[in-house]
Amino acid sequence: MSPELDEKLSALLDGELAPAEAAALRAELARSPELAARLAALASVDEALRGLPSRPVPAGLRARLAARLAAPTPARPRRWLAAAALAAAAAALALLALPRTEREETRVAETEPAPAPSAPPESPPAPVPEPRAAEALAEAEDLPVIEVLDVLAELDELEEVGSG
Amino acid sequence: MVDEDVRLMLAFRDGDDGAFDALFERWAGRVLRFLERMVGEASVAEDLVQETFARVWRARARYQPEARFSTWLFTIAGNAARNELRRPFRRAPHESMDEEAAGAALALAADDPPADAVVDARREGAGLEAGLAALPARQREALWLRAVEGLSYAEVAAALATSEKSVKALIHRARVALARGMKRGETR
C-alpha cells in the first residue's frame, strides 16, 4: 500500500477528502478486503481513544481558579522570576569560575619548579572542570532567553487567537 | 448560527461573570482530559486547566466569535501544555509515582479480582494510554483534537499553528502507531 493511499484512509475517516476522491476511495475499499481491514484498524484507534476513562473535575478546582483570578499578580511573572533566578545563577557560576582559573594558574606556577615526575600526571585532569563550567554557563545563559522568547510568542499567539 | 458557547463567551465579554462559570462547567472536564494526556501528570494538568481558564478570563475583552469556542479554548490549552513540556528541568511524567506506590496499587487491584471484561478493558486502556504517551507531542495533540474533540484539520492546524497538510500527516502517523500497538496487544 502506498503511503499516499494509506494517508487518504485517515483523511476519509476524518471527512477531509473531496467528494470525488472519497467516492473513488470507497469504490476501491469495496474491492479490497485488505484495504477495508486497514481502514477498520485505523478507525478502531479513534473509537478506543473516545472510550478512554475520564475522571471528574476535582471539586476544589473552580475555587482555586477563583483565588488565582482574585490574586493581584497573574501567573505570568512566575516565568520572569524563573528567568531572573537563572540569570542570577549564571552570574554566580561566572564568579565561581573566575577564582578557579586563577587558582589553577597559581597551582601550575607552584608545581612548575618542582622537578619531581609526579607533577605532570596531576595537570591533565585539571582542565576538565573548565569546559564543564563553560557548558553550564552557556546553558544557564541560554535558558532565560528561550523563556523570554516563549513568553513573547505566547503573548502573540494569544493576541492572534483573541482577535481572530 | 451562534453556538451556545459563543453566546456565553460574548455574555462574559460583556460583563456577565456567571457566563464564565457556565463555560467552566461545560468545558473544564474536557480540557482536563486533554491536558492529562498532553502532560501525563494529573496535578500538572489541573494546574494547566486553571491556567487555561485564567487566560480565557484575561483575554475576554479581545474575544471575537470568528472561530468555534472549542477551537479557541483548545488552542489556549494546547499552548499551555506546550509551554509546560518545554520547561527546563521539567519532571518526567509519572516520575512522581514511585515503584512502591505502584506495587501497592497493583496488590490492591489483585485483592479484588474484577470481571474478565473489566480486566481486558482496563489492560487495553492502559496499553493505549502508554502508546499515546509515547507519541511525539504534536502527533498526540493533533490526533486527540481530531478524534476526541472533533476539530477539523483546519481547526487543528490553527490550534497547532501549522498547515493542514502537516496536520493530516501528524494525525495519520499517530493513528498508524497506535493501531500497531493495539494489534500487538491483541496477539499477545
Image: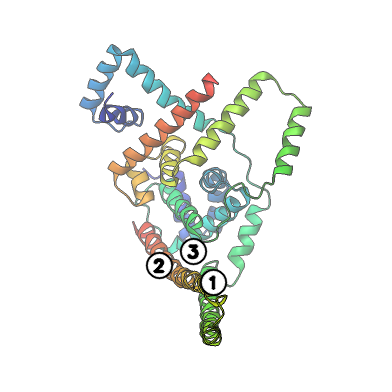
Residue A121: numbered disc? 1
Residue A149: numbered disc? 2
Point out the frontmost of discs 2 and 1.
1
How far is mark 1 from mark 3, CA to CA? 63 Å
Residue nearer the viewer, A65 or B126: B126
Chain at tag 1: A
**Residue B108 vertical position relative to residue B100 in the rendered view, above or below:** above
Residue A156: numbered disc? none
Chain at tag 2: A
Q: Identify the residue at horizontal 56%, vertical 50% (top origin).
A: B24
Q: Identify the residue at horizontal 40%, vertical 31% (top origin).
A: B176
The amino acid type, in three-letter code, at marker 1 is: Pro
Most distant residue in the left direction: A20
Q: Identify the residue at horizontal 61%, vertical 69% (top origin).
A: A71
On screen, residue A18 versus residue B101, left or right, reads left
Residue nearer the viewer, B181 or A20: B181
**Residue A159 vertical position relative to residue A77 in the rendered view, above or below:** above
Chain at tag 3: B
How far is mark 3 from mark 2, CA to CA? 21 Å
Determine which residue is flagged by label 3: B58
The amino acid type, in three-letter code, at marker 3 is: Arg
Say what secondary structure mark 1 lies in: helix
Residue A128 lies, in percent from the top left, at 50, 70
Residue nearer the viewer, A122 or A143: A122
Q: Mark 2 near mark 1, Cβ–Cβ under 8 Å? A: no
Point out the frontmost of discs 3 and 2.
2
